[in-house]
Image (cartoon, rainbow, N blue to C red):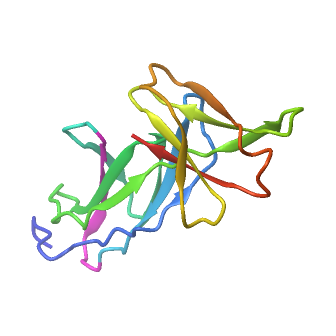
Amino acid sequence: MHGRLSRVVPVLSALFWLAQPGAVFAERSVTLAWNPSQSPGVAGYYLYVLEENSVTPTRITIGNTNQTTVSTLKEGLHYSFTITAFNASGMESVPSNEALFVVPVPLSMVAVSSNGLKRIQFQGAPGRSYELQASSDLSTWSTIWQSGMVATYGPLEYEDIASGVLGHRFYRLVVH
């Protein structure tokens, strides 16, 4: 390799492992893996992370490995990731394919109230609005609650008034 990485195109895997909460403010981490470069002289990799509503990606220097964990991802936000290989001179390969990821927002059943109604809770993030949907068959979904635009990080909660009369019910959250 003489100053250039011409045909090295690492393939970033679309397989993600979501870790447990790493901090307050609903932050998560994700582990990324990619095919290692077959080109001799690769000194390491750069990971480019672009957060939704950002213009410039953050570049993270990774050693000569084909896996890394990115932390402080915010629930409900979209992220894109690309990888480049670099040599000892700092020359970069062309970027890998782009992997897209939306950090999920976990729902939890907080408690069943004395009247038998289920309470659903999740972390809200600033600049987002939420739509809670329910289904009895995982095929047909109905919106049962919507939030306005959330101003700060914090828990949001909804008590499902129909849960006391239904045998079973599934829930999902749509983040806007």
Residue closest to the eye, 149 or 53? 149
Q: Residue furthest top?
A: 151
Residue closest to the eye, 32 or 173? 173
21 with respect to 80 (left or right): right
Q: Residue furthest bottom?
A: 38
Q: Is residue 57 visible?
A: yes
Q: Is residue 46 visible?
A: no
Is 50 inside the magenta-drawn segment?
Answer: yes
Q: Is residue 134 above or below residue 24?
A: below
Is 22 inside the magenta-drawn segment?
Answer: no
Magenta segment boundaries in residue numbering: 38-52
Q: Work out which quarter of the rendered image holds the C terminus and state it.
A: top left
Task: Determine which quarter of the picture holds residue 159.
Answer: top right
Q: Residue furthest front?
A: 165
Q: Residue at x 81, y 37 (%)?
A: 111
Task: Determine which quarter of the picture holds residue 128.
Answer: top left
Where residue 158 sits in the image (x, y, percent)?
65, 33
Where residue 76 sits in the image (x, y, percent)?
45, 42
Task: Determine which quarter of the picture holds residue 63.
Answer: bottom left
Magenta stretch, main secondary structure class:
strand
Q: Residue at x 84, y 33 (%)?
A: 113
**Figure label count:** 0
Q: Is residue 138 above or below residue 166?
A: below
Q: Residue at x 48, y 37 (%)?
A: 130
77 with respect to 123 (left or right): left
Where residue 25 sits in the image (x, y, percent)?
55, 28
Residue closest to the eye, 124 or 135? 135
Q: Residue at x 70, y 43 (%)?
A: 108
Residue closest to the eye, 107 or 93? 107
